[in-house]
Image (cartoon, helix red, strand yellow):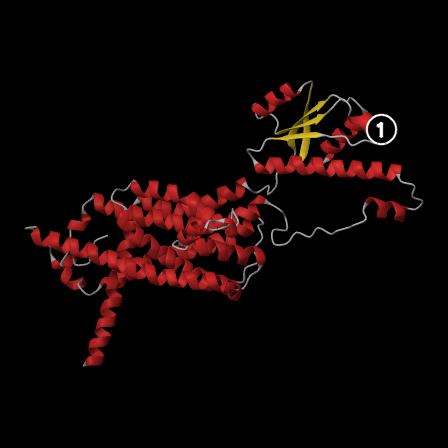
Amino acid sequence: MEKDSLIYKISHGLRDMCYICMRELRQTVTDEGVLIFFILVPLLYPLAYSWIYNNEVVREVPVAVVDFSHSHASREFTRLLDGTPDTKVAYHCNSLDEAKDLVGKQVVNGVIYFPKQFQNKLYRQEQTHVGVYCDMSLMLTYKAIYQSAQAVASQMNTKIQLSLSKNFTSRDEEVSSKPLDFDEVPIFNTTGGYGNFIIPGVLMLIIQQTLLLGIGLSAGTARETNRNHELVPISRYHAGIFRIVLGKFMCYFMIYMVLAAYLTLIVPRLFGFISLVYAYDLTMFMLPYLLSCIFFGMTMSCLVRLRENVMLLVVFTSVPFLFMSGVSWPQNDIPGVWQGIAWLFPSTFGIRGFVRMGSMGARLSDIHPEYIALWIQTLVYFFLTCIVYRNQMRRARASSSESPMMVDSSNSSEVAD
């Protein structure tokens, strides 16, 4: 008898969970806003971001040249600078003020200045200078101009040094010009591209933020339409809060396990980004990340009172979440207080773990702290979600007891959102 009763409870609970899941799925499909955030945004946003950063590095950054020297050395420097892949000599100006106006109008991103005594000092074997003025509002263009000018200056310095030396063989010249040789070997982000640097973190953040948007939008819609007070008899669910939470979770998980595979496997390969992930490790890592993001979104939905509020909340937090993850700013340089706050969000550990797996080829054992942290967040936010939903049910029960209207028990699957 007890065995039959236990089997009945399990089957009854599974049936309730499936019903709630299908009902939530139906509401997701019929609500255009939720459908956009759950389907269209995860599908299209990664493509837009990846297309923007598809060039990886900036090339042919325009610069202006102010040449008061009018010498062979200054013209050679200009020719070599224009021959580099990262810069392009776009204008020759007669004064610094003219070049400054071009920078202000964003026609050029930097200025190369040759003083009048540029070549004369070289002939007198004195140190001369080249002025390099860069627009620091965009670090990528600054890096391109500065490194190109530095490379050209190093090349000309070597040539001058060899012309003044009294070497007899090529080996002597090689030792004189480069007494300490080195090999530059880029690791992890081997292309040195901005896309490989930022896109993996953005992809993981999209998963969390779209879940927050969709779940919050659904909760806001429910409150605007007063569905919290259109309760069915609570007696069926007075001890079944887990059924409600898990039923809704099943709906979100079914949608996002497909989207997660698309974001982590297909998008990087479409645009040729570095992807060194192992299928088993990625699957095991994405499981707690999706769980924690879903329960985090369900917990935070209690803060959404109006449909539009969730937009402000998520838009405001997107950039801070990315910064606190440590992908755009070194984690060790983030103040301790903000590092503690960052531990509250699944995106922090999800971004760190996925970047190390994708760019560095880390295995699951290499990201053990992030993996354990995501499971802890899953448990914490699961129980917080249950508490939040139970409080909502208590308020709804009190409201329904005050209402003179009776609700048909045949529709007993309505749940407060």
Identified at 56% across, 45% down, the residue is: 195
Q: In this picture, is 55 found above or below 201?
A: above
The percent position of residue 387, horizontal first and vertical second, equals: 25, 59
Q: Which residue is mark 1?
A: 124
- Outermost residue, bottom side: 1
Amino acid residing under circle 1: Arg
Q: Nearer the viewer, residue 371 or 263?
A: 371
**Residue 67 figure quarter:** top right
The percent position of residue 244, horizontal first and vertical second, equals: 25, 60
Identified at 16% across, 59% down, the residue is: 412
Q: In this picture, is 18 found above or below 168?
A: below
Q: Nearer the viewer, residue 151 or 18?
A: 151
The percent position of residue 358, horizontal first and vertical second, equals: 54, 56
Q: Nearer the viewer, residue 9 or 370?
A: 370
Q: In this picture, is 125 found above or below 377?
A: above
Identified at 53% across, 49% down, the residue is: 330
